[in-house]
Image (tube, rainbow, N blue to C red):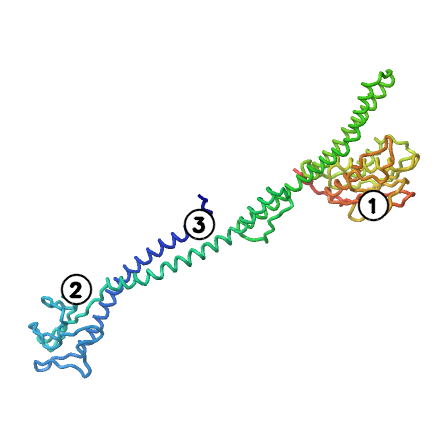
Amino acid sequence: MRKCSVKTKITIWITLLMFILSALLIAFTLAIGNAVILRTSREQLIRTLRSSAAQVRLQDGRVNTDEGFQFYRSGVSTLVYSSKESLLAGQLPVSFAGVEGFEKGVIRTAKGEQAEYLVLDLWVASGWEDGVWLRGLLEVPDSRQIAYSFLQVAAVALPVFLLLAALGGYRIVRRAFRPLDAINATASAISEAKDLSRRIGLPPGRDEFSSLAQVFDQLFARLEHSFEAEKQFTADASHELRTPVSIIKGACEYAEKYDETPEERQETIAMIARQADKMSSLIDQLLRMTRLDQGTESARMETVDLSALVEELLREQRRPPERLSAAVQPGVTVCGDAALLARLAGNLVDNAFKYGKPDGHVWVSVAADGEEAQLCVRDDGIGISREQQDKIWQRFYQVDPARSGETQGAGLGLSMVRQIAQLHGGHMTLESVPGIGSSFVLHLPLAEKGGADAAAVGE
């Protein structure tokens, strides 16, 4: 048996609630209706009888009435009795059996043969001792007949009302659950097609479901980003590790197949060690880039003296002094992670030497320009053509893949440089002329003077 949906359950509950409220309303209406009818009848009897009392007089033992006086008016029968309770004028209703005695100003009930009557007596004095009794009789409407008529109308109107309530309730519930349906459909599509690029895409709203849809869109975006980062890491690692693994495997097979001399064996071991170091370095870079992509590697933002950081980096460089020149303006500070900025500067310097002339030069400068700090690394190497300048920031892209030897890199240095620059709210620019050289410039906002250290980013 198919399970009942939440929308159907809510609609049934709303309809049942409306039915209960309608039944209570009908019962309340009937109860109030009887009281209202009785009260209205009493007021009508009092008003009519008082009006009649003003038009009746006793003169010379005879009853006189004003012109236009009616003994039956507004459903009230008016009877005139003598002080000795003898009927002088008026006519009793056919079904009225009568009541004993007169009670001035007291309304009471008397049952007739076919109906129930309200009875009210008033004394109309004539002189000190004489006068007449006025008795008013009003047939009370049959409440059972009224209730029956009301229930007949309710029996027709209530189903129509409940049907409209059910249809309206279901429409409101369906519209309210539309974001949830979209979430469910999107999640199912992602599960079946494994397409993390799908989004719910509901317009912003103030209700809880719209907020939930936005949260799910953010969740899907983060899942897609993490999945793409994992795919990228897997593809990058399998692509770049294939060559050193092949070299190590070939060296091992050669060593097993041939009887090497101690010198050859030592050279093979050294080659395996170099390839292992290259693999380790490559994996470390890939992991760091993946963590930066996913935000899992924290960047501790603090005030960093970029000038001192670059000077320290250059002192640690094992380069001939005549090939590495520096022009560092002191006191240039930025807000950033010192370790990541040192890695960025080191990658730029290493890249400049890798793609420079064999005896070429590298110039490094740090300066403040307006409201930003600039770190410039310039070389006189092979240069980069205009068509390739947008591609060099891609992973594993190399301007000259034919270059080989110890200076060949994996093509990850500049990609990591751009990542770190963007993480710090900065950007990279490049000016290059083929055959003359390239100039890489990091642009970062200057740190505010006296500003407190920022909280960690990426945690």
Between discs 1 and 2, the one toward the N terminus: 2
**Left/right of residue 126 with respect to residue 343 in the rendered view:** left
Q: Say few, some or many: other residues with alpha carbon within 10 Å of mark 2 (under 14 / 14 to 19 / 20 or more).
A: some
Image x and y of residue 108, in percent: 16, 64
- Expressed as whole percent of the image width and height from the top left, the position of residue 118 reads 18, 67
6 relative to 438 in the view: left or right = left
Query: Of the numbered discs in the image, which one, if any, rests on residue 269?
Result: none
Read off the residue under disc 3: 10
Q: Quadrant of residue 307?
A: top right
Q: In the orientation shown, which residue stands out farthest toward the left? A: 84
Task: Specify the amino acid type for callout 2.
Answer: Thr
Q: Which element carries disc 1, helix, strand or loop?
A: loop
Pointer 1 residue: 389
- Evaluate if marks 1 and 2 touch, with contact meaning CB atoms under 8 Å apart: no
Name the residue rendered at 87%, 17% in the picture.
Answer: 263
Which residue is at 15% across, 70% downward? 121
For the image, the number of numbered tags is 3
The N terminus sits in image quarter: top left
Which of 420 and 92 lies nearest the eye of the viewer? 92
In the picture of the structure, the residue carrying the numbered disc 2 is 109
Whole-Å distance between the Cαs marked 1 and 3?
A: 61 Å
User: What whole-number distance in Å separates the C-alpha atoms at marks 1 and 2?
Assistant: 108 Å
Q: Nearer the viewer, residue 168 or 352?
A: 168
